[in-house]
Image: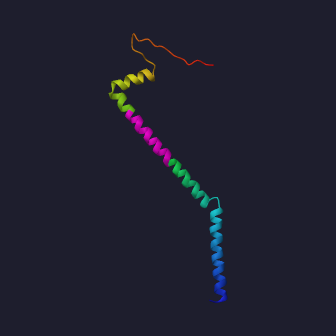
C-alpha cells in the first residue's frame, strides 16, 4: 500500500474512533440510551404491578356485587358498621 493510502486509512479510522468517543460521551448519545432503557424497565415493572392491583380490585368488585360475606366484611371494616344489638369494644394500645 502506498503512503497516501496508509495515511488516509489511519485518518479515517481515527475519525471513526473520535465519532464513537463523542457519541459515548455526549449526553444525547449512549448515556441517554442507557438511561432511557433503565426508565423503560422501571415503567414496565410499574405496569406489571398496576396490572396485578387492577386484577385484585376487579376480583374485589365482583365479590362485593355477588358475595354477601364480602359485602358484610366491607361494611364492617371500611364503613365501621355493626349489626343491631352488637356491642363494639374498642381496644387501644397503651402509650408509654
Quadrant for the C terminus, please: top right
Q: Is residue 94 left or right of residue 58?
A: right
Q: Quadrant of residue 76?
A: top left
Q: Residue furthest left?
A: 66
- Residue drawn at x 41%, y 22% is 75
- Residue drawn at x 39%, y 14% is 83
Quadrant for the N terminus, please: bottom right
Q: Is residue 38 above or below residue 21?
A: above
Q: Position of residue 21 (x, y in %)?
A: 65, 67
Query: What segment is highlighted magenta in the picture?
Result: 44-59
The image shows a total of numbered marks equal to: 0
Q: Is residue 49 left or right of residue 19?
A: left
Asked whether residue 88 is drawn in magenta, I would say no
Q: Position of residue 54 (x, y in %)?
A: 43, 38
Which is more toward the observer, 87 or 28? 87
Q: Position of residue 70 (x, y in %)?
A: 37, 26
Asked whether residue 51 is drawn in magenta, I would say yes
- Residue drawn at x 43%, y 41% is 52
Q: Is residue 67 left or right of residue 15?
A: left
Q: Position of residue 25 (x, y in %)?
A: 65, 62
Q: Residue furthest bottom?
A: 2
Q: Is residue 66 above or below residue 96?
A: below
Q: Quadrant of residue 61?
A: top left
Q: Is residue 3 left or right of residue 64?
A: right
Which is more toward the observer, 9 or 86? 86
Instruction: Name the chief secondary structure element in magenta.
Output: helix
- Residue drawn at x 55%, y 52% is 38
Q: Is residue 89 above or below residue 25?
A: above
Q: How was this image coloured?
A: rainbow
Q: Is residue 3 above or below residue 89?
A: below
Amino acid at each position: 500500500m502506498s503512503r497516501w493510502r496508509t495515511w488516509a486509512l489511519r485518518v479515517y479510522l481515527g475519525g471513526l474512533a473520535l465519532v464513537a468517543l463523542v457519541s459515548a460521551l455526549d449526553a444525547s448519545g449512549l448515556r441517554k440510551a442507557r438511561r432511557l432503557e433503565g426508565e423503560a424497565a422501571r415503567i414496565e415493572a410499574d405496569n406489571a404491578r398496576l396490572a396485578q392491583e387492577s386484577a385484585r380490585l376487579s376480583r374485589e368488585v365482583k365479590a362485593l356485587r355477588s358475595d354477601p360475606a364480602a359485602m358484610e366484611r366491607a361494611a364492617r371494616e371500611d364503613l365501621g358498621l355493626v349489626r343491631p344489638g352488637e356491642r363494639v369494644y374498642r381496644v387501644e394500645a397503651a402509650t408509654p
